[in-house]
Image (tube, rainbow, N blue to C red):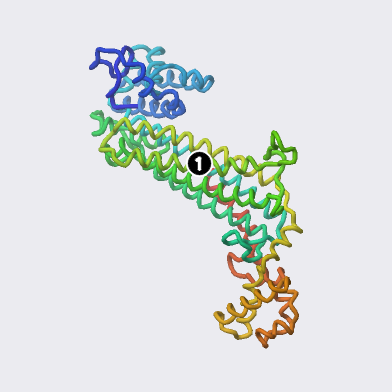
Amino acid sequence: MTDGHGAGGSGAMWGGRFEGASDPLFRALNDSLPFDHRLVRHDLQGSIAWARALAGAGALAAVEAEQIISALGDIGAMAASNPRAVAEAGDEDVHSWVESRLIERVGALGKKLHTGRSRNDQVATDLRLYVREECLARVDEIRRTQDALVGAAERWPDAPFPGYTHLQPAQPTLFAHWCLAHFEALDRDADRFLSARARAGLCPLGSGALTGTTFPVDRESIARELGFDGPTRNSLDAVSDRDFVVDALHAAALCAVHLSRFAEDLIIYSTAEFSLVTLSDAVTSGSSLMPQKKNPDALELLRGKSGRITGALVALLTTLKGLPLAYNKDLQEDKEPLFDALRHLSLSLRAAPVVLDGLTLHTDACARAAAAGYSNATELADYLVRINVPFRDAHEVAGRIVRFAIERGQPLEAIDLADFRRFAPAIGPDIHEALTIQATLARRNVPGGTAPGRVQAAVTSARLRLATKREQEAAR
């Protein structure tokens, strides 16, 4: 995809300046059809809008525009029926493929379509259309994963679950609260994709190679026809801007990181050492040597794919950082990272609900883990505060009681009242009830907290939010 600087040869869209044939290695380096064929539908949409705009500007007769539009429709049907043939056609890029097929159908009339248009504004338009479409597709997949997380929370609404910091026992929580934590991260990812889509919302067609077209096309009308919010405001910026690709890759990279963290949690929880969950056979594999193995391959691939998706973002930022205005052939390197990242994120998002729907939670093991590791020590400190011990002193006293319990191999809730009172005489007989998991959870009764009532309300709210957002997104 280029403004016309590149290899020559018969049949090229820009060959008049050149006499010699292109070197085969240069063709291999230069030609983009093997990957940009994915944009054929978007290129046809833009070409149809451009044909109408040229007719409106008097550069095409109405009957000529209708002939071209009809032929472009036929080309679209052909491409949809055999995408592989497009990819393997041997043309330089998707634009030249479309133009060649058009000329085959309508003869010299097909050569008029490129009047006033450059492949620079053409590809920028195609790619914006693609990004806008793919952003919505990823949002839909995110919603499906969120739905699966809420479903898991609903299956085990009251199950205690260990909470960790530094991967060490921290405080008890609920499994449903864990599900909703990942729900919230994905919700931000959906917002980022919607924001990326919005920032791809202006139409470059009519910008020409870099300075705009000389034909009086109605750019507002072109933008509306293609579903954009309006035309781009500066032709020089329009053909060189790839911020919208970076935005989409940033949303993809962060979403992949969130999926990786989700996967890492479940990989850990499914180990024999934790044994908190069991993954279904549908998302695991065995060993070619060790008969007992059940490996969390789907989750490991979710974790692994975050690397290539993050790499795509870094690759494009590195490509863009030194480019002068306006178009440079370096910009051809925006597509493969984008296509690859969005494809693999789509696979990951579609796999995550399968993992969740087949998950088995071992509630007894989870309850034991939630109570282990003196995870109720903070509750002991808070109890001391409630009997008027300053928090810093309460923290110190609770730490000494934990050390006492460790030396005797006892959990906090098993310590005798008399032993408690050696450290803080005001401790009452209600201390043992205060240190139970149920009491520890119930006291986190603040918005966003892990108290069962709060979590149940949050699950209900998450369901309602999903339904509302899906309605809004369906209307876009």
Count the numbered circles shown: 1
Residue drawn 24% across the image and 15% down it: 18
Q: Is residue 8 left or right of residue 292?
A: left
Residue 284 visible here: yes
Residue drawn 40% across the image and 20% down it: 98
Amino acid type, residue under disc 1 in the picture: Leu
Q: Is residue 367 left or right of residue 139?
A: right
Q: Is residue 276 above or below residue 452?
A: above
What residue occupies the far bottom of the structure in this picture?
425
Quadrant in the rendering for residue 129: top left
Residue drawn 65% across the image and 43% down it: 296
Q: Secondary structure at mark 1?
A: helix
Identify the residue position indicated by label 1 in the image. Answer: 136
| Quadrant where the image shows the N terminus | top left
Q: Is residue 213 above or below residue 233?
A: above
Toward the viewer: 428 or 349? 428
Residue drawn 43% across the image and 21% down it: 72
Toward the viewer: 384 or 18? 384
Q: Residue 407: x, y in percent?
A: 69, 73
Residue 456 visible here: no
Q: Residue 462: x, y in percent?
A: 61, 55
Q: Residue 343: x, y in percent?
A: 52, 35
